Amino acid sequence: MLLILTILGAIATITLYGGRSWCHYVCPFGMVQTVFTGPRGLLGSKAHTKPMGSITQSMCRTVGPEPGQEQSTCINCKSPCLDIDSEKSYWYHLNRPGRQLVQYGYLGLVVGYIVYYLLYAGNPDYYFSGAWSHEPNQLGSLLKPGFYIAGEAINIPKLVAAPLTLAGFAGLGYSFGTYLELFLRRFYQRHNTETNREQVRHQVFQSARFLPSIFFHLRRTSRDQSPAAQGPASFPGIDCLYQCSLDLPYLGTQP
């Protein structure tokens, strides 16, 4: 039902406003794309160096009258647009209100997602076994205790405990990220390093982007190696090395 409503919402939004209005302004996954895209992909094209009017990256387009010819169908629904010039869009939004909350809050959200399973079951086996994915009568358990800590059930409904945990960790992630920015700015100032505010934020942003990816791949590798795992196992370390190759080159990128 949720998937059907999402599809209908996307169709309605695009019909009314055109372009990629759904992706840019409504779809919650747009925030995830913002967190993980960064300036651009390692193998992505450098749209900011192309001549004006070029059809770049994931720009809206159609096939022209000539064979193999493409024409832009951009309606300028957002400028600068992530799909046209991800590098320009990244630096433009770097200091916009709420950008820190999205980047650092997502880091906390990922950690909180894993930690809640530990708080709910009292041990990591419940999460790594995958039992939660096929637990019977899930709706009926929403009002049951949502925490199990030190061998004791905490009488807070699961319906409240889960979002409370996610919100709390998102807040912790935001606090950690903003404090780390402040710490690094002061560190660079004491050592007379020519690093401006934007560069510091960019470095912390890239770290906050890198950590959830590594955490996810390590978690997946641990799950695949557990006795209850189904399907082929991941080769340890390959996913992490791949993510490093994508993220680390941009830690020193300058605006």
Image: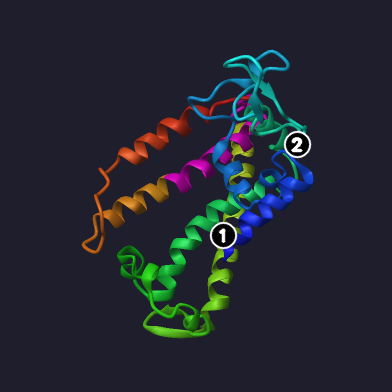
Q: Position of residue 188 (x, y in %)?
A: 60, 32
Which secondary structure lies at badge 2? loop
For image coordinates 59% across by 20% down, the residue present is: 46
* Image coordinates for residue 118, horizontal then vertical, percent: 40, 69
Q: Secondary structure at mark 1?
A: helix
Quadrant the N terminus occupies: bottom right
Q: How many marks on residues?
A: 2
Residue 90, numbered label = none
Which label sits on residue 3? 1
Q: Is residue 113 above or below residue 11?
A: below
Q: State the image quarter where residue 134 is shown.
A: bottom left
- Report the magenta residues as a range: 189-213
Residue 145 makes an appearance in the image: no
Taking the spot 26% from the left edge, 58% from the top edge, the residue there is: 230
Task: Give the x, y percent position of residue 231.
Answer: 25, 54
Residue 24, placed above or below residue 163:
above
The residue indicated by pointer 2 is: 78
Query: How far across and down, in percent of the image, does residue 153 sit?
Result: 43, 85
Task: Give the quadrant of the C terminus.
Answer: top right
Determine the residue located farthest toward the left in the rendered image: 227
Q: Sequence-wise, which precedes: disc 1 or disc 2?
A: 1
Tell whether 44 sits left or right of 202.
Answer: left
> Quick check: 150 above or below 174?
below
Look at the image and tell me whether residue 102 can be seen. yes
Residue drawn at point x = 54 percent, y = 75 percent: 161
Residue at (24% x, 64% y) in the render: 228
Of badges 1 and 2, the one in the foreground is 1
